[in-house]
Amino acid sequence: METSMDVSSVQRIVLRGLGQQCVRHYFLSVRQPARARSFLRSVATKVASASQTRGDSSVTVALTYSGLQALQLREEYLSAFRRLAPAFVEGAAARAAAHLGDTGRNESPAWQQQFLSSRTHIALSVYAESDAGCEKLAASLRKDSEESNCVSGWETALAGKQSGSGADRREPFGFRDGISQPTVKRVHLDWAQRNPPSLHVEAGEFLLGHANEDGSNRWSDEEVPLPVREFVRDGSFMALRKMRQDVAAFNELPAEVRAKMCGRWPNGALVREGETVQPEQAPGDGDANRFDFKHDPLGYGCPFASHIRRMNPRSDVVIPPRKRVLMRRGMPYAEGNEVGLLGVFVCADLERQFEFLLNSWTRAVPARPDDQVPDPLIGARDGERAVFPIPQRAGGRPGEPFSSFVTTRGTLYGFFPSLRALASIETAI
């Protein structure tokens, strides 16, 4: 019988998600390193473990590379990150144009300031069932930090709130969200077995210090000092990305075209050949995932350029033929007339996973690499108008003209330490 992994030190958001309705993302700066390390040790007791059941509120903690420096980690730790995680070290803003496809109106100088500041050291996120619950927990943490004058930055936060509840949570374009998530082998979650085998992946795709789908484990290399290996083990990298969505422009398209662009109908049902309206019956969580594209080899139902088919090609032949998995967490936000998504993307390799998807498969169709049409749902492209290809049998409409519906407002790279690393961070000093 397969042995289960011990995930008691993994931040719950990485493997299970948190499930609460509201979030506040705070971008904090370290004022006094020793006191900030003490604050993080205390915060670790409020961070939910992947082995725990969901509570009414929770906290997640991610550190930027400048945060590791500000906390005064030893050089052997910093040099390991420089060698093995260059994207994390360089930061999203510096890599936006070349590695994320963010140019023109999406270029990093136009991002919100908290995504650009070298003083963003800690991304601390508070989750709760209500706005009031978020504010209460954040106020308690802020009080603790202000008493020791250890960190600053509590004045502003990015606020998100779920639209819908349970299995019917929706993103701003109106589609059911969070349906297709990979699960980790040997981590036996109560819902994991409802996923098809194609979505079960090795732990090293998300957790440092474990083997990935290729069988490699760079963070356990002998060149990595043992204390560093222990510090990073069960940690993950994350990208917090804020995306403004032009819902009005998107809704000008016919409902069938919007579904083709997503690859699913708003209720989560896969778009199939010949369908022009949404099926009345919404699929269950398991049924919504149990499909591949063998029944649709020419894309007559779910086009190759659709969001779900390009982000997870499943049975399609792609170049290179490798899974590119991310754990996706996110909540809609509303700021005045602006709406969009606060996405948290979790992986073990920002370059090979997050950046590859954003700059390669989001820009071009993986099954047809000569087709440079951007992803219509998350492809933030400046001034670009394209024709979304809709394969049809003879006599059908070949495509739909569209412009980008998404504008990047900022991206932050962080490292989710394990609870063990947070609690013993002094050992890295």
Image (spheres, rainbow, N blue to C red):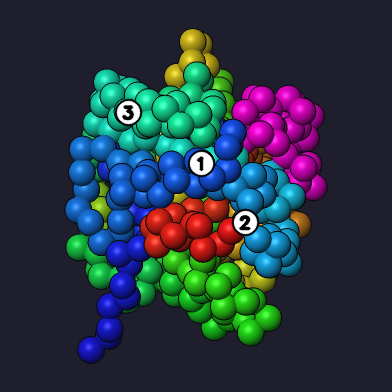
- Select label 3 or label 1 by which is in front: 1
Tag 2 residue? 73
The image's mark for residue 36 is 1
Q: Quadrant of residue 402?
A: top right
Number of numbered discs visible in the structure rendering? 3
Q: Residues within 10 Å of mark 3 (few under 14, many from 20)?
A: few
Measured from the top left, where is residue 218 in percent x and y?
A: 62, 76
Q: Where on the picture, by quarter, is residue 183?
A: bottom left
Q: Quadrant of the N terminus?
A: bottom left
Query: Label 1 is placed on what type of residue?
Result: Ala
Which sits earlier in the primary sequence, circle 1 or circle 2?
Answer: 1
Answer above or below: position of 134 versus 266.
above
Q: Position of residue 82 (x, y in %)?
A: 73, 61
Q: Nearer the viewer, residue 318 or 49?
A: 49
Identified at 37% across, 44% down, the residue is 43
- Of the numbered discs 3 and 1, the one sitting upstream in the chain is 1
| Circle nearer the N terminus (3, 2) | 2
- Span highlighted in magenta in the image: 93-120
| Residue most extreme to the bottom | 1
> For the residues marked 3 and 2, what is the alpha-carbon distance in whole angstroms?
27 Å
Tag 3 secondary structure: helix
Look at label 2 and name its amino acid: Leu
As for residue 30 lying within the magenta part, the answer is: no
Residue at disc 2, secondary structure: loop
Position of residue 312 relative to residue 222, above or below, is above
Where residue 246 sits: x, y (%)? 55, 23
In the rendered structure, are the residues bearing label 3 and label 1 in contact, judged by CB atoms less than 8 Å apart?
no
Q: How far apart in space, not on screen, are marks 1 and 2 (Cα)?
A: 12 Å
